[in-house]
């Protein structure tokens, strides 16, 4: 039995450009506490939390994310329910959006928005082409 992966196809909510490159999401990040700016590549596989980039984001550090295409912030005015850090949001190419925590190491995120389970299940079924809705 093969394991299906949900590779998120994410876009900038401002310019609508695709930010998913293969299995990675390309973003720019600024670390205010360290006064560092650079590129980051987050895993586009839902549930995988790897981070690579031109800057080191230490465990627990909070990043401010921007679109590398239009330089607009993708931060939103919501805070993580797990650690209270600011959240970021990207648009899914097939509809909906994903919100994710800006703190390195926190796994706070939601498909479809603020954790509405029905909306999340519908989006997962669409992604995996299952007949249930």
Image: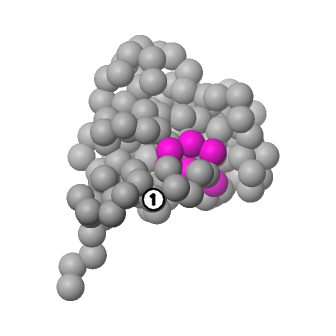
Residue lying at 45% horizontally and 17% vertically, measured from the top left? 14
Image quarter of the C terminus: bottom left
- Colour scheme of the rendered structure: one colour
Can you see residue 75?
yes
- Name the outermost residue toward the right: 84
Can you see residue 58?
no
Please provide the residue range marked out in magenta: 108-114
Instruction: Give the quadrant of residue 87.
Output: top right
Vertical order, 77 against 127 (above or below): above
| Residue 124, x across and y down, in percent | 38, 57
Disc 1: CA contacts within 10 A as few (<14), some (14-19) or many (>=20) = some
| Residue 59, x across and y down, in percent | 66, 55
| Residue 27, x across and y down, in percent | 44, 32
Q: Is residue 50 left or right of residue 30?
A: left
Q: Nearer the viewer, residue 114 or 30?
A: 114
Query: In the rendered structure, does residue 91 fall within the stretch colored magenta?
Result: no
Vertical order, 94 against 127 (above or below): above
Image quarter of the N terminus: bottom left
The residue that disc 1 covers is: 121
Instruction: Give the quadrant of residue 41.
Output: top left
Badge 1 element: helix
Vertical order, 38 against 133 (above or below): above
Q: Nearer the viewer, residue 79 or 106?
A: 79
Q: Is residue 119 left or right of residue 25?
A: right
| Residue 51, x across and y down, in percent | 47, 51
Q: Is residue 21 left or right of residue 28?
A: left
């Amino acid at each position: 039995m093969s394991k299906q992966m949900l590779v998120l196809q994410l876009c900038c909510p401002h310019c609508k450009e695709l930010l998913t490159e293969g299995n990675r999401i390309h973003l720019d990040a600024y670390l205010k506490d360290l006064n560092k700016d650079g590129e980051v590549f987050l895993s586009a596989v839902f549930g995988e939390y790897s981070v690579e980039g031109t800057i080191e984001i230490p465990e627990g550090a909070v990043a401010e994310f921007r679109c590398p295409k239009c330089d607009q912030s993708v931060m939103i005015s919501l805070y993580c329910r797990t650690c209270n850090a600011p959240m970021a949001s990207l648009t899914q190419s097939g509809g909906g959006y994903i919100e994710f925590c800006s703190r390195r190491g926190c796994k706070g995120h939601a498909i479809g928005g603020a954790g509405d389970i029905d909306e999340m299940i519908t989006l997962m079924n669409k992604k995996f082409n299952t007949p249930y809705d």
